[in-house]
Amino acid sequence: MKQTIYFQDKSLIFSKVRSESEGFVCPAEEAVSLDRAKVLKIFENHNSLTQLCTDPEAAFRRFAEEFTVVEAAGGVVVNGRGEWLMIHRNDRWDLPKGHVEPGESFDRCAEREIEEETGVKAKVLRPLCDTWHAYYFPRTARWELKRTHWYLLRSTDQHALVPQTEEGIEAVAWCKQSAVDDCLKQSYPTIRCVVEALRVVVRK
């Protein structure tokens, strides 16, 4: 069991054991003293930090207290041709998602945000995974920790693709399976996590 928080392309992992592929490692006795300032300092020279701890969930919750937690939802929309819906923003390929409104369910948020950002109406089929992403938000002058609830959705009708340009979305595209891997090379680690979760579902 482990918990991962992404800071853009860098990852903070709370885990009981060390993986051979992981970068900088903090010993278990430092779990209590780990804070955001220390993590950001380590990230100046490393892309990955693993905090070893006996209780990853508790260590994660303690670290999260330094942030304002926000909820979001989005997903992978698949059409009748087996293509996946992706958006292009800030020179990265991404998946449509957005913040949950008061009183809104996570699955309904995913459907609404996808339609707003792409023009495509879709229905949730099943949940895929949750991801955590930390960032500084200048508008509110605070550090936020965003939990995004990801879903698999189906679109059966033909819809015009309309990028929500006011949200910085430059393009919307249906991607064939052969093109998805190329898109992922220009994406975020969180998006690669979602795609891997979907591929696990497909393999079952």
Image (spheres, grey):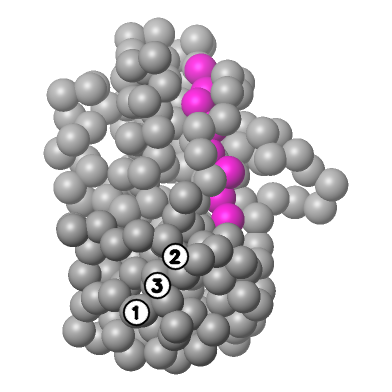
> Which stretch did the figure color magenta?
145-154
Give the distance between the C-alpha atoms of the residues marked 1 and 2, in whole angstroms: 10 Å
Q: Position of residue 51 (x, y in %)?
A: 40, 72
Q: Position of residue 43 (x, y in %)?
A: 29, 81
Q: Disc 3 designates what residue?
A: 51
Which of the two labelled residues, at mark 3 and mark 1, occupies the earlier sequence position? 1
Horizontally, residue 115 falls left or right of residue 101, namely left
- Above or below residue 66? Residue 50 is above
- Above or below residue 94? Residue 142 is below
| Cβ atoms at labels 3 and 2 below 8 Å apart | yes
Q: Disc 2 designates what residue?
A: 14
Mark 3 is surrounded, within 10 Å at the Cα level, by few (under 14), some (14 to 19) or many (20 or more) other residues, namely: many
Horizontally, residue 108 falls left or right of residue 72, namely right
Q: Disc 1 designates what residue?
A: 26
What's the magenta bit mostly, secondary-structure-wise?
Answer: strand
Identify the image quadrant of residue 162: top left
- Above or below residue 191? Residue 160 is above
Identify the image quadrant of residue 177: top left
**What amino acid is found at the position of numbered circle 3 in the picture?**
Gln
**What amino acid is found at the position of numbered circle 1 in the picture?**
Cys
Which of the two labelled residues, at mark 3 and mark 2, occupies the earlier sequence position? 2
